[in-house]
Image: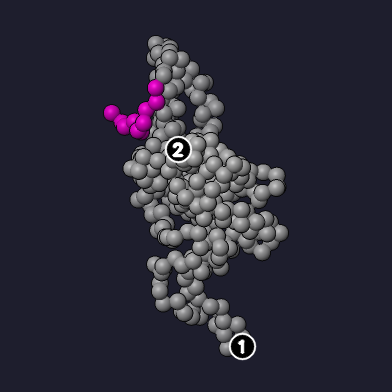
Amino acid sequence: MIGVLGDFLGVPILEINCAILSPSGYKGTTLNQHVAEFAGRLACGNKTSPAIVVWEEIDKLADDRSEAGRYRRMTQADALRFLDGAACGEEATLDASRILSIGLGAFEGLDRIRNPRTVPVIGFNGNADQEVKFDESGPDSELLPDHLIEFGLMPEFVGRFSQFAALDPIVAGTMKRIICESESSALLRRIAYFSLNGVRLMFDDDAVDVIVAMAMAHPTGARSLGMILNKLLLDLEFRLPDLVAEGVFEISFDKRAARGETGPVLARESSRELRESLMEIRRKAGGYITRPMSKG
């Protein structure tokens, strides 16, 4: 979505990974290093080209009142001048007012702050199953700066952002589109790799649905797709040269194979000519497919 915005506006998209960001003066990647990099790409003399900076995993900067949380709060403080749109960099060559900052994060646990629907009742007359509603705004309540501050971000840091939005969780239909249609799909990359070696890798609709259900149940969501496919395909990838030499030209997964209950179906051609042809494809193939192969 942000990439589409960048293409529409004709500006570059730059990233800051907040999960590995360190406060100034400490070991690790600091905001000053990012500013120097941005200045090298965007600044020319006294002019700074417009750009969008995406603060990835910005929730990792939250202070959780631990010792590490204190350093995260220091990192938030380092970012205030940049987010203010001031001149930044060793020689103040980067005009941050020309840069749009967008913060993204999973904010695990923020829903409990936004919509505290139950209060545990303690006492002789209490019922552990009793539900007491005191937030009538429902699950679609507005995301407010106070919620982010309670989550652990500094008021000064939150105040530098002018708009706040909570996105809906991924539904099964969206997850299926990610695995079947996304250009960065882990499944399509695997299919391309197998195709490069002359082997058709296939997942029927039921198998895809099983993978989607497993990803939906995993707390990391769409990022778990790669992990699930690794579990299914890693051994086959290591054995791929031997499988090609044995004449395997198609590997098919149904729902049982996707669950790991059975192995995939390996289709072999026993003729020597086809085996040699597959080996030749493996040596000479130079392109990747971009969509799963279909039967027929």
Q: Is residue 138 visible?
A: yes
- Label 2: few (<14), some (14–19) or many (≥20) C-alpha neighbours in 10 Å: many
The residue wearing badge 1 is 124
SS for callout 2: helix
Residues shaded magenta: 287-296
Query: Which residue is rendered at x = 54% and y = 45% of the image?
Result: 16
Answer above or below: position of 109 versus 217: below
Work out how far the residue at label 1 is from the one at label 2, CA to CA, in angstroms: 54 Å
Query: Which residue is rendered at x = 49% and y = 22% of the image?
Result: 243
Give me the disc on residue 186: 2
Return the x and y of residue 202 as percentages of the image width and height. Answer: 38, 33
CB within 8 Å, label 1 to label 2? no
Give me the disc on residue 209: none
Query: Would residue 290 be counted in the magenta stretch?
Result: yes
Return the x and y of residue 121 as percentages of the image width and height. Answer: 57, 81
Indicate the amino acid at tag 2.
Ala
Find the residue positioned furthest to the bottom.
125
Find the residue positioned furthest to the left.
296
Q: Can residue 262 be seen in this view?
A: no
